[in-house]
Amino acid sequence: MQYVSTRGQAPVLTFEDTMLTGLARDGGLYVPEHIPTLSTDEIAAMAGQSYEDVAYTVMRPFIGATFTDTEFRELIAAAYAPFGHAARAPLVQLAPNHFLLELFHGPTLAFKDFAMQLIGQMFQKALGRKGERVTIVGATSGDTGSAAIEAFRGLDNVDVFILYPHGRVSEVQRRQMTTPTESNVHALAIDGDFDDCQARLKDMFNDFEFRDGVKLAGVNSINWGRVLAQVVYYFSSAVSLGAPHREISFTVPTGNFGDIFAGYIAKRMGLPVRDLVIATNQNDILDRCMKGQGYRKGTVHASISPSMDIQVSSNFERALFEAYGRDGGAVAQLMAELAEGGFDVSQGAMEALRENYSSGRASEAETSATITKALAETGELLCPHSAVGVKVADERREEAVPMITLATAHPAKFPDAVEAATGIRPPLPARMADLFDREERLTRLPNDLAALKTHIKETLAL
């Protein structure tokens, strides 16, 4: 299995090199040269299997010779052992034909754990074999950072720097990043919003002297390994509801588009997906784009669902690559236009996008009202991101097709928003009960590339 860049000018890589590289050297994102398919019988055989066995079947065709069969099974087992639910990603019924996929039973209570725990295991194995050390730099709107720090803390072959927008993540999210004591993890509070953090991350990758000097690697959803690990729970949940013998739809609360693009990959692999619904909060660039208004950056507005406070969705580039017939030159031109403010999607590409995706949005008031309603009608306490998904799913779901809404975080990660909507302040799990008593360790930095590079090099003693 080989991987190519969405902008068409970077070297073709193996899975291992793609995973360790992150962002392509032409600024693009890596995608598989071809997408393998699973037969109806192979998908049907997943019924009743463990999550780990499904994960092996789904991901193995993408791995190539990077890990042996035995190694890969061991890495998967180690990745999901810390999860707090035997099913890893259990389904809960909200209403007739509407189900919630709980993706918050991992170590940091968010869906990012499904990918990050596995990425951590794969990095450690690959780097240990090579005898190399890398510097991981990530940008986060809240959950990616804590999941990355949890996955890589204390590992021998990596140093981790996580950029997060100062004052724009929840207290639980911040403390999950700032309270680990291991010396190889570093939380950097940036004066700006998430898009600023993401832009500085890409700037560092595009500075090849710096990139090569610190051996930079990335674990944002720009990393193909992140997307691949998220494909698995589309299969596990759909098979639980009758796939491949019936169609299933999914609604995905999303900001950076990686989670829903994983659903597209599942569909291309043979999973019978009727609809992939993009659910956005008030920062609705994706919804506006799908409604034909172009893809144009606006002001990021802080919300009660902060992990979705994004105006530049990095993984949408992968969707555009597919919609434009895998034309790297066309994608590079669109990304150049985006740097100047935005672009229009061609009619043909728009039709291709709409064959796979639809969209909706939820305002702040609608998000809060959905949290209130869900508790009253189902007893389910939703985090605000999951509530965005449930609100949009209720508008989009069909009577004959099961709808699965992805619950992307535990409500205890956003206690203020949940308490305001329900009067209930959700407690943290027992293993995290002392989170607010732990000492924080962070560095606040300006939204400035030079300052960031200097801080990282000084920390690494380079």
Image (cartoon, rainbow, N blue to C red):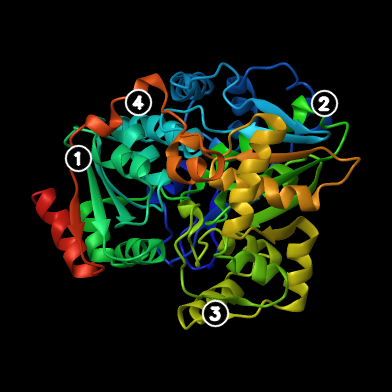
* Position of residue 151 in the picture relative to residue 333 (left or right): left
- Mark number, residue 432: 4
Q: Nearer the viewer, mark 3 or mark 4?
A: 4
* Position of residue 299 in the picture relative to residue 317 (left or right): left
- Mark number, residue 404: none
Q: Position of residue 175 (x, y in %)?
A: 29, 40
Q: Where 83 sits versus 95, above or below?
A: above
Residue closer to the observer: 4 or 270: 270
Residue for badge 2:
41
Residue for badge 3:
342
> Residue drawn at (54%, 51%), measured in percent from left and top?
3
Q: Position of residue 203 (x, y in %)?
A: 33, 67
* Quadrant showing the N terminus: top right
Q: CA distance from mark 2 to mark 1?
A: 51 Å
First in sequence: mark 1 vs mark 4: 4
> Residue drawn at (72%, 75%), measured in percent from left and top?
292
Crowd class of label 4 (few under 14; some 14 to 19; many from 20; radius 10 Å): few
Q: Secondary structure at mark 2?
A: helix
First in sequence: mark 3 vs mark 2: 2
Q: Position of residue 274 (x, y in %)?
A: 82, 47
In the rendered image, the residue lying farthest to the front is: 423
Q: Nearer the viewer, mark 2 or mark 1?
A: 1
Mark 3: amino acid: Gly
Crowd class of label 3 (few under 14; some 14 to 19; many from 20; radius 10 Å): some
Mark 2: amino acid: Asp
Q: CA distance from mark 3 to mark 2?
A: 44 Å
> Residue drawn at (77%, 21%), measured in percent from left and top?
45
Residue for badge 1:
440
Q: CA distance from mark 1 to mark 3?
A: 39 Å
Q: Secondary structure at mark 4?
A: helix
Q: Secondary structure at mark 3?
A: strand
Crowd class of label 1 (few under 14; some 14 to 19; many from 20; radius 10 Å): some
